[in-house]
Image: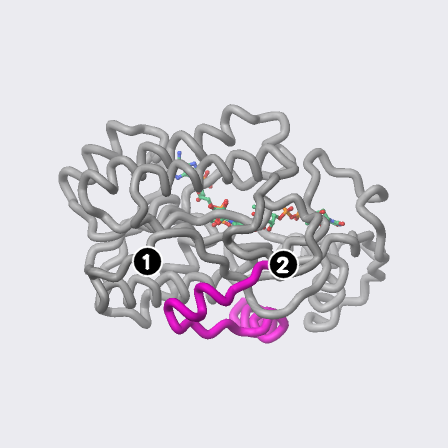
Amino acid sequence: MKNILVTGGHGQLGLSLKKAATAYPQFNLIFMDAAELDVTDADALSAYFGANQPDACINCAAYTAVDKAESEEEKAFLLNFQAVLSLAEICAEHRTQLIHISTDYVFSGKQNVPYREDDETDPQSIYGSSKLRGEAAALGYNPDTIVIRTSWLYSEYAVNFLKRMQELMREKQELSVVFDQTGTPTYAGDLATALLDILQYKAGNPDAAIGGIYHYSNEGVTSWYDFAVTIKELTAATTTILPVTSDKYQTAAARPAYSVLNKEKIKETFGIQVPYWRDSLTKCLRRM
Ligand SMILES: NC(=O)C1=CN([C@@H]2O[C@H](COP(=O)(O)OP(=O)(O)OC[C@H]3O[C@@H](n4cnc5c(N)ncnc54)[C@H](OP(=O)(O)O)[C@@H]3O)[C@@H](O)[C@H]2O)C=CC1
Ligand SMILES: Cc1cn([C@H]2C[C@H](O)[C@@H](COP(=O)(O)OP(=O)(O)O[C@H]3O[C@@H](C)C(=O)[C@@H](O)[C@H]3O)O2)c(=O)[nH]c1=O
């Protein structure tokens, strides 16, 4: 287990992996963006795998614009489902360990206890539906595939809620943020480390049957409103933040009202330690 291909390598998680990988010199990560390796192009994927035979592939390529997906269903499914199907088939053919990333938005949000991996899924949006089909595609081809569902990712890179809030807090004196959607923010740097720890575990236990779905987010529970207020506090911003219900903040896509993930399985299987979300937010802000 040495050469690791990262598809969608210049997005938020890809760039977070690049940073985290400096602590894992045993791995050689190869980051490919859409222009270098288009995951929707099955021939290009085949040619790449034929020539390079990566030991593992972390698929960070995705369509992540939740609201836009409602009017771009075909595009969302092409990237989040069809491309995953091709990638899973090619990984199975080349005996490449595939790690695929999915989302808390596969759940309806009707539960009020943290979601386990085998709890019923019922996405409320096109994005969530496309990601759910992607999970099935990834696992259907090869039961050794690892699917990691995560939630509310943010980092110093790309587009995310933290950076959007910082921008809005610079521009506006008052902001409204929903308080009736509950979940857990996840620092992409922590997820990146967890992904590398999983590959490390696999390298040490090559015959372990560890395929399947795992949940990973930071520890703790909050709402988008409380997340925004904490960002305000930690950055000493002065904007007034008003708590509103989702019906007062209209969006094209519906989001789950509750999407806290239960992380027992990933912690027990791989011995991964999970930081508390507020500590990770502080760490991320320090790095920014
Ligand atoms: N962001 C979040 O809050 C959450 C994300 N996730 C999941 O985590 C994963 C990583 O997300 P994140 O890093 O935040 O997403 P980003 O949107 O930051 O990154 C996705 C990357 O995919 C690339 N991409 C787009 N089309 C293609 C293509 N045809 N071939 C190859 N690459 C392509 C994009 O490139 P370009 O920008 O050039 O189009 C972009 O760099 C995704 O699977 C996502 O669904 C799960 C939960 C929360
Ligand atoms: C910018 C903004 C958003 N909101 C609301 C809208 C939404 O309900 C919630 C989150 O906002 P966003 O649209 O930025 O986040 P969203 O795109 O829904 O984030 C999701 O992205 C995908 C990729 C995932 O997989 C999920 O885990 C999750 O992280 O906050 C406000 O209430 N006020 C605001 O000013």
Label 2: state its secondary structure: loop
Image location (x, y in percent) of residue 254: 70, 39
Any mark on residue 260, and which?
A: 2
Image location (x, y in percent) of residue 232: 74, 67
Q: Residues within 10 Å of mark 2 (few under 14, many from 20)?
A: many
Task: Give the residue type at disc 2.
Answer: Val
Label 1: state its secondary structure: loop
Image location (x, y in percent) of residue 123: 61, 39
* Residue occupying image coordinates x 46% and y 64%: 265
Image location (x, y in percent) of residue 235: 69, 70
State whether the magenta stretch is mostly helix, strand or loop.
helix
Start and end of the magenta stretch? 260-288
* Residue occupying image coordinates x 20% and y 52%: 55
Q: Which residue is mark 1?
A: 210
Image quadrant holding the N terminus, namely: bottom left
34 relative position to 73: left or right: left
Determine which quarter of the picture holds residue 33. top left
Q: Is residue 153 visible?
A: no
Of 26 and 18, which appears nearest the observer?
Answer: 26
Q: Is residue 59 visible?
A: yes
- Would residue 116 be counted in the magenta stretch? no
- Would residue 280 be counted in the magenta stretch? yes
Q: Earlier in the sequence, mark 1 or mark 2?
A: 1
Placement of 236 over or under 53, stated as above or below: below
* Residue occupying image coordinates x 58% and y 69%: 219
Task: Give the residue type at disc 1.
Answer: Ile
Determine which quarter of the picture holds residue 285. bottom right
Placement of 63 over or under 243, stated as above or below: above
Beta carbon of the mark 2 residue lies under 8 A of ligand 2: no
Of 201 and 55, which appears nearest the observer?
Answer: 201
Image quadrant holding the C terminus, namely: bottom right
240 relative position to 18: left or right: right
